Amino acid sequence: MSVTHSFASINETLLLSITTLQAIQAYRNGCCEPDERPGVLRALAELSMFEFPAYKRHLKNYREILWTRARDERKPVLFLFRQLDPAITLSQLLCDVVDVWVNELKPGRPLAWFFAEVLQEASSLEGAPVQFSKIKHYNSLRSILSTYPDGLRDLWVVCDWLLKGDDYRFAKESTASGEKWIQDVCGVVEGEDRDLLEHLQPPGGIEELALLPAPEATRHAISLLQILYELQLLSEPSEDAEVPNIHNRLGTRFRELLRDTLAPGKKDLLIHQALRIQEHAITGGKPLLWLHRDLSCVFSTLFVMAVLSELSLARLFTGDLLDADFPRLTKTASRLSEAPMQSASVPPGALQEVLEKIPPGDPGDLLVLCDWALDGSDSEEVKRFALNGARIEDGAGPVGER
């Protein structure tokens, strides 16, 4: 069954944006209707995201595209939102243009001039060849654009998430053809430097739901290690650069993954799972399935290689590797690639589908490691699978023992 995606015009989205700003001011003045309060609180929560530097950079880019390419040059633009809300993002853009932060919409402050300027900016955007769409995480970029009603030639597509897998390949092919330009949070998808980003994409940079054999995961991890070492990715990115170079983009992405990996409990979990991988798969030669939801499976594989090589994690994370480190990492990578182990990136709600891909064998020998806490439907699916004799562990330990 084909799915038709909805696309909102600039005029429709502007109306929602201005209504949102008016509702926020009414809420601050105590004039908000009870049934409007949840929507206003949600809008304020989403607007608070733009306090973070990464989102500020996105806004600067969106503003340039919307005001220059679409309004002034009258070239078509399609904004696709998976993480943010189109109307709320446009509300923040309007605030930025008139140089007012949304928190300045305070009780009792006369802001007639603010809304007059916002309306003036909004009117300048009316009729621009721009459309917006809020999409689900499972909607592919190919399917979305196949239903776009206005044609694709000379279209600039802006995605508010990091493209990966089929979406990334489709975007690169489309941009290379010159028919349209597609960009995500790291810029236009073109050139060989963007291929390096495939190694840094959560939750894996690998096809979701595909079982990745140990040799392939290890090869990707070694490639990532070489990138980190050669480019010294932890150098501070330039905030002043109009277009950050590939070193800065990769460095920023790597730091985000590093922050997630070293979050409370996550580092300890990965160290524990590295030791379980060594005990069960590398030394014991028994099958192991490593499932990832919170982190990149390639990044996690590199982390395990470092732990089992007794390599300083601090030096790994700073790219300060010594010549003596590489023989140890190569030896560990060789042992890991020979282990009867597979990895998979598992989005929410897809655990059962992944478990069904496991080839038949002696379930009593199989160990399944999950890098997230199993609960709800995931827990039930795993328990049913465990009834066949497989051993399943998450951050809280063996599933069957609790």
Image: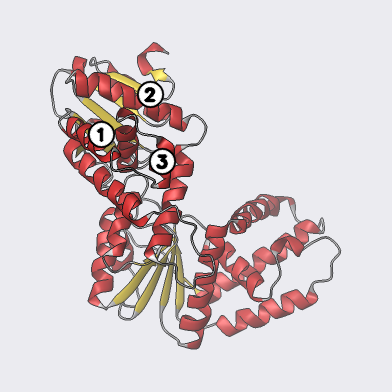
Left or right: where 151 falls relative to 360: right
Q: Which residue is mark 3?
A: 315
Distance from label 2 to label 1 (Cα)? Answer: 20 Å
**Dot 3 lies on which element?**
helix
**Dot 1 lies on which element?**
helix
Q: Residues within 10 Å of mark 3 (few under 14, many from 20)?
A: few
Comes first in the chain, label 3 or label 2:
2
* Nearer to us in this view, 294 or 351: 294
Q: Quadrant of the N terminus?
A: bottom left
Q: Which residue is mark 2?
A: 272
Which quadrant of the figure has residue 322?
top left
Q: Which circle marks residue 328 in the picture?
A: 1
Q: What percent of the width, then of the height, locates residue 365?
A: 19, 17
Q: Quadrant of the C terminus?
A: top left
> Measuring 65% from the left and 63% from the top, which residue is drawn there?
20
Q: As drawn, which residue projects farthest toward the top?
A: 401
**Dot 2 lies on which element?**
helix
Comes first in the chain, label 2 or label 1:
2
> Measuring 32% from the left and 21% from the top, which residue is drawn there?
392
